[in-house]
Amino acid sequence: MNERIYNFNPGPAVLPEDVLKEVQSEMLNFHGTGMSILEISHRAPAYDEVHQQAKADIKELMGLGDDYDIIFTAGGASQTFALIPLNFATESHPGSYALSGSFSQKAYEEAVKLGVGTVAASTK
């Protein structure tokens, strides 16, 4: 019997063994830097290379052009629901939400806390 446990939770999720083995082999010396990727500053060129390559790979995978940018944020979906109205909506230009499930409801509730949420459509 295989000893691996397959985690199908929203995240983190299952990674292929080849990926895990590559990470393991570079854990103590990432790309010849003499440091683990866990120890490298997010401002260091070695990390920036990883960051930029990840962004490029996602854009290629999704077929996105240069008029799109990829951002990585901490906190998952729930935090992002709060960040979007904080950064993009105003009282004169509120966010319009199509309420079709639990995630859209959560996003709308975050906008309402700031007074910048309206319902455009609802399946209720």
Image (tube, rainbow, N blue to C red):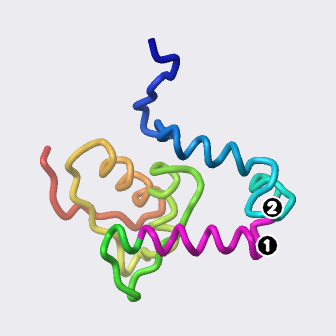
Residue where numbered disc 2 is placed: 40
Instruction: Find residue 67 and report its image quarter.
Output: bottom left
Q: Secondary structure at mark 2?
A: loop
What secondary structure characterizes most of the magenta part?
A: helix
Apparent side of residue 3 relative to residue 101 in the rendered image (left or right): right
Q: Residues within 10 Å of mark 1 (few under 14, many from 20)?
A: few
Tell me the amino acid under the disc marked 2.
Ile
Q: Secondary structure at mark 1?
A: loop
- Give the mark count: 2
Residue 50 falls within the magenta-colored stretch: yes
Depth check, front residue: 12 or 21: 21
| Residue 86 x, y percent position in the rendering | 51, 68
Q: Residue lying furthest left in this view?
A: 123
| Residue 118 x, y percent position in the rendering | 28, 64
Cβ atoms under marks 2 and 1 closer than 8 Å: yes
Apparent side of residue 108 relative to residue 79 in the rendered image (left or right): left
Apparent side of residue 90 relative to residue 21 in the rendered image (left or right): left
Apparent side of residue 105 relative to residue 81 in the rendered image (left or right): left
Tell me the amino acid under the disc marked 1.
Ala
**Which stretch is magenta?**
40-58
Q: Quadrant of the N terminus?
A: top left
Residue where numbered disc 1 is placed: 44
| Residue 79 x, y percent position in the rendering | 52, 53
Q: Residues within 10 Å of mark 2 (few under 14, many from 20)?
A: some
Q: Residue lying furthest right in this view?
A: 34
Q: Residue lying furthest top in this view?
A: 1
Mark number, residue 57: none
| Residue 108 x, y percent position in the rendering | 35, 55
Depth check, front residue: 88 or 59: 59
Residue found at x 19% / y 64%: 120
Residue 46 falls within the magenta-colored stretch: yes
